């Protein structure tokens, strides 16, 4: 006679606690790596919408001009973008106007959160795009030439280490970094803004003139520099290790560059 074989019960196992911890850690690392890129992607998408609206306003204005209106009514619209300045690569061209980092007769001002774009026409100038950023005046904000000097070379040199070691803790800064704005030299501490230790401090942060000790980084940094008298700066990386945005703050002004220090915009908030 044949003996009936007992069917073995299959055991169903879930994740162990150690495995869950490893998975959570991996997800955390991925979030740190992908979040800045995703944020930049979203902001550039907002800018694309603003530029498309500017193009539509330009086309409408030119049609009005073609219909013999010497000075048609300006067209304005609210901006979608949230960050001051441009995250999109320069130059930016809309219709007959182009922006390479320096304001011109046809491209005026700096876009920003809650800002507007006014598209107008003057017979002697053509179409004019005037950008503003919420609390800023719609008038032109000064733009200066400058140079990040050896600082840009140094920051590009540490790009490959951006997701590890001190670049992800409260030592993600570099002291005695020198650069020039409008012919004046500044030496200050520069913070990596996408560091895990610092990026939360910049959520909702609107740069305004303050001292080094009043910066959002000061309470978090590993150690202080009592000789820091020229404010502070912070930056983010773009594609391939380029410097996407470099912001410098001192007790009088706020400057920002999106082309690796070649041009600097004065984004100091206007007094209300």
Image (cartoon, helix red, strand yellow):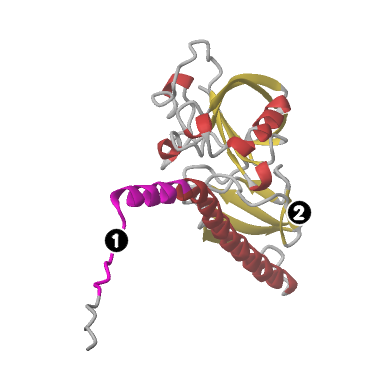
Q: Extreme top residue here? A: 227
The reply to whether residue 73 is in sight is no
Residue shown at the point (49%, 14%) measured from the top left: 225
**Highlighted magenta segment, given as a residue range:** 8-29
Residue shown at the point (47%, 43%) measured from the top left: 135
**Quadrant (top left/top right/bottom left/bottom right) for the C terminus:** top left
Residue 210 sits above or below residue 96 on the image: above
Residue 130 sits above or below residue 246 on the image: below
Give the image location of residue 104, x and y in percent: 73, 46
**Are there few (<14), some (14-19), or many (20+) residues within 10 Å of tag 2?**
few
| Residue topped by disc 1 | 14
Residue 120 lies left or right of residue 97; in this view the side is left
The image's mark for residue 125 is 2
Q: How many marks?
A: 2
Residue shown at the point (68%, 32%) measured from the top left: 157
Give the image location of residue 172, x and y in percent: 51, 29
Q: Extreme bottom residue here? A: 1
Residue shown at the point (73%, 26%) measured from the top left: 149
Is residue 17 found inside the magenta-colored segment of the image?
yes
**How far is mark 2 from mark 1, CA to CA?**
70 Å
**Are there few (<14), some (14-19), or many (20+) residues within 10 Å of tag 1?**
few
Label 2 secondary element: loop
Give the image location of residue 270, x and y in percent: 49, 36
Viewer-closest of 45 and 35: 35
Give the image location of residue 256, x and y in percent: 60, 36
Label 1 secondary element: loop
**Quadrant (top left/top right/bottom left/bottom right) for the N terminus:** bottom left
Residue 251 sits above or below residue 42 on the image: above
Is residue 79 found inside the magenta-colored segment of the image?
no
């Amino acid at each position: 006679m044949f003996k009936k074989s007992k069917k073995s019960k299959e055991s169903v196992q879930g994740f162990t606690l150690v495995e869950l911890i490893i998975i959570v850690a991996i997800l955390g690392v991925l979030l740190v790596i992908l979040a800045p890129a995703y944020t930049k992607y979203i902001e550039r998408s907002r800018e694309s919408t603003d530029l498309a609206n500017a193009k539509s306003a330009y086309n409408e204005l030119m049609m009005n001009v073609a219909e013999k209106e010497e000075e048609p009514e300006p067209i304005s619209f609210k901006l979608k973008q949230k960050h001051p300045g441009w995250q999109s690569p320069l130059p930016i061209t809309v219709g007959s106007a182009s922006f390479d980092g320096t304001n011109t007769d046809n491209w005026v001002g700096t876009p920003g959160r809650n800002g507007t774009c006014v598209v107008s026409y003057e017979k002697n100038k053509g179409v004019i795009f005037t950008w503003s950023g919420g609390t800023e005046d719609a008038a032109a904000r000064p733009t200066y030439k400058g140079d990040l000097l050896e600082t840009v070379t140094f920051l590009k040199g540490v790009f490959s280490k951006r997701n590890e070691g001190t670049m992800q803790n409260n030592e993600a800064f570099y002291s005695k970094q020198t650069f020039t704005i409008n012919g004046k030299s500044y030496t200050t501490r520069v913070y990596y803004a996408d560091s895990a230790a610092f990026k939360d401090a910049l959520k909702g942060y609107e740069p305004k003139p303050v001292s080094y000790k009043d910066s959002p980084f000061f309470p978090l940094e590993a150690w202080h520099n009592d000789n820091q008298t020229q404010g502070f700066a912070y930056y983010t990386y773009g594609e391939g290790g380029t410097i996407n945005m470099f912001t410098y703050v001192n007790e009088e002004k706020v400057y920002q560059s999106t082309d690796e220090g070649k041009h600097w915009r004065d984004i100091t908030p206007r007094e209300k």
